[in-house]
Image (cartoon, rainbow, N blue to C red):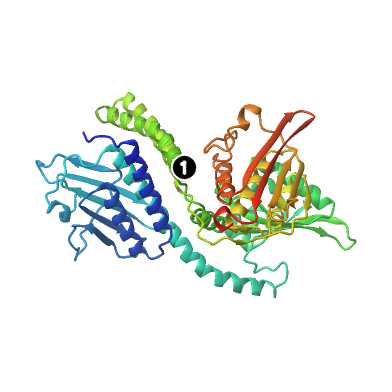
């Protein structure tokens, strides 16, 4: 067997992976993206030859790009994407393996490796082939690195598709917004689902768009409870909405989740207005829903492409977090082969799949953050804070969270705006999750006493607080006390962003029953150290 990689070699491979991910995230043209990927694979593995066969979405012509000593492919042969990684070592083979392309077999290599990847159905799939003149050239660790590169390639193809789709949709959305200003508030031909309900939550009207998006015909749903469209864990949201409607209040652009007829969950932006009869008495409510599922996916993909790539400490974290599950997977897969029809073998397979899922989750959550390329510029922290509060205001109102603002800062530190907005958003989101039963959110932005010093902002909540034994660990990567929400990466990234600007972040918290809550305070200098 090939020798395992040393710690320095692992660090070097992880750095190559990070750099490859950054390059892939900036390429929009498919063939150039594939060429970047196969070149990176050869550099990472040391293979003499690399081929990448790519099958685009239905209707597109297959592509093949080459690297190293691979000959040009004039006529693309038929190929089938394998279901798993395939590896062959040893030099002389009793028969030619059917999965190795002729272009590689003709080179008489001694080691071969095939690594498949699959993106979304709209972005296609493919397979990397590598050939090496060395015996046992591809170690288990090297195989894992190349699998990670394949996952990055799949993600990059999807992000490139989303960017192209977003560019095409921007002009459509601008035109749609102009048309909306000319239309009445509620019309039968609305593109958005529009429905009305009584004060006791019974649906009284349902338009064609509602049938298209949510799946129910008017005959099926009119007369049924509105709770039929709401996930069980969000039924309390409806009680809050009903209370606001009875008080004559409107609810605008409230982002939540609704159920379709077939049980799918879709992200929607919800606007609710009270309905009054001719005497002015409130008799029900009208709801306008906009399906924002696609927008949410695009926003998340673009946000991933704009975040900082983890360096030094992140690379060490990856190596530490990934080693143990990888070793388990390798051992379990080895045990699996002779026992695949045995009940014990099935048990090993189940365990291996769980370990693979855990490794994949760690890799995606860690390697999915890309550095923001925008230059730092003078930015008003006060305006960033006010912008974030406007975004989260509907959620705060819906859960009876009172927001107190003390914003007096007039200075504009030199910042990368996207990074600092992410810090503020992370801290506000954590505060909201800490107050499931309502409370007070206090935000402050002020200039430091010394004129040339900087700006301090704080975000404080009256939530449950952080236990003392957890307080020292909250900035560690992957550490979280919430089992179903969050990944434990938000505060880690926030500290990286703040310290990258020459600032500092601190936290105080109490779990005392009479005085509980958490306060994060961030100091930002007027200019980062490199620009001072």
Residue 184 on image: x %, y %: 72, 71
523 sits left or right of 163 in the view: right
Quickly name the residue at label 1.
314
For this rendering, which residue is in front, 279 or 131?
131
Quadrant where the N terminus is found in the figure: top left
Residue 33, picture quadrant? bottom left
For this rendering, which residue is in front, 479 or 85?
479
At horizontal 68% and vertical 52% (from top left) the residue drawn is 453
Residue 132's place in the image compared with 156, above or below, is above
21 sits left or right of 497 in the view: left
For this rendering, which residue is in front, 396 or 32?
32
257 sits left or right of 59 in the view: right
Residue 448's place in the image compared with 437, above or below, is below
At horizontal 73% and vertical 36% (from top left) the residue drawn is 517
At horizontal 45% and vertical 40% (from top left) the residue drawn is 362
At horizontal 19% and vertical 41% (from top left) the residue drawn is 88
Q: Is residue 254 visible?
A: yes
Residue 482 on image: x %, y %: 60, 35
Residue 33's place in the image compared with 228, above or below, is below
Residue 334, picture quadrant? top left
């Amino acid at each position: 067997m090939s020798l395992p990689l040393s710690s320095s070699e692992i660090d070097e491979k992880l750095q190559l992976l990070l750099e490859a991910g950054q390059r892939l995230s900036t390429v929009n043209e498919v063939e150039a993206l594939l060429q970047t990927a196969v070149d990176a694979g050869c550099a990472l593995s040391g293979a003499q030859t690399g081929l990448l066969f790519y099958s685009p979405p239905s209707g597109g012509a297959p592509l093949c790009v080459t690297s190293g000593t691979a000959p040009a492919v004039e006529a693309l042969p038929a190929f089938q994407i394998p279901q798993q990684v395939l590896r062959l070592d040893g030099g002389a083979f009793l028969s030619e393996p059917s999965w190795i392309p002729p272009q590689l077999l003709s080179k008489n290599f001694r080691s071969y490796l095939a690594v498949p990847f699959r993106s979304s159905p709209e972005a296609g799939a493919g397979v990397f082939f590598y050939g090496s003149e060395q015996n046992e050239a591809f170690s288990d660790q090297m195989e894992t690195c190349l699998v990670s590169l394949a996952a990055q390639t799949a993600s990059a193809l999807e992000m490139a598709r989303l960017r192209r789709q977003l560019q095409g949709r921007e002009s459509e959305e601008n035109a749609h917004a102009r048309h909306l200003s000319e239309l009445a508030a509620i019309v039968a031909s609305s593109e958005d689902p529009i429905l009305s309900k009584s004060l006791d939550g019974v649906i009284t009207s349902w338009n064609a768009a509602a049938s298209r998006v949510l799946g129910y015909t008017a005959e099926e749903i009119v007369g049924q409870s509105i709770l039929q469209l709401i996930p069980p864990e969000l039924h309390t949201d409806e009680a809050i909405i009903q209370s606001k409607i009875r008080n004559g209040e409107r609810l605008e652009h409230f982002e939540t989740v609704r159920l379709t007829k077939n049980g799918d969950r879709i992200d929607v932006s919800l606007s609710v207005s009270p309905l009054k009869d001719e005497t002015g008495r409130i008799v029900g409510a009208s709801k306008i829903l906009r399906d924002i599922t696609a927008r949410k996916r695009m926003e998340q993909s673009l946000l991933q492409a704009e975040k900082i790539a983890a360096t030094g400490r992140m690379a060490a974290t990856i190596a530490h977090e990934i080693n143990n599950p990888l070793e388990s997977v390798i051992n379990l897969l080895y045990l699996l082969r002779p026992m695949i029809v045995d009940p014990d073998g099935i048990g090993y397979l189940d365990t291996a799949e769980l370990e693979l899922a855990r490794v994949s989750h760690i890799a995606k959550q860690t390697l999915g953050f890309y550095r923001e390329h925008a230059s730092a510029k003078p930015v008003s922290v006060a305006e960033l804070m006010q912008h974030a509060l406007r975004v989260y205001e509907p959620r705060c109102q819906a859960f009876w969270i009172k927001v107190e603002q003390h914003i007096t800062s007039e200075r504009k530190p030199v910042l990368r705006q996207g990074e600092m907005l992410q810090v503020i958003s992370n801290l506000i989101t954590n505060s909201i999750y800490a107050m499931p039963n309502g409370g007070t959110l206090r935000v402050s932005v002020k200039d430091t006493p010394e004129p040339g010093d900087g700006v301090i902002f704080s975000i404080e909540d009256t939530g449950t607080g952080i236990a003392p034994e957890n307080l020292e660990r909250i900035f560690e990567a992957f550490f979280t006390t919430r089992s179903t929400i969050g990944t434990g990466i938000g505060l880690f990234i926030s500290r990286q962003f703040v310290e990258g600007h020459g600032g500092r972040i601190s936290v105080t918290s109490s779990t005392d029953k009479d005085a509980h809550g958490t306060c994060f305070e961030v100091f930002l200098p007027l200019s980062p150290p490199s620009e001072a």
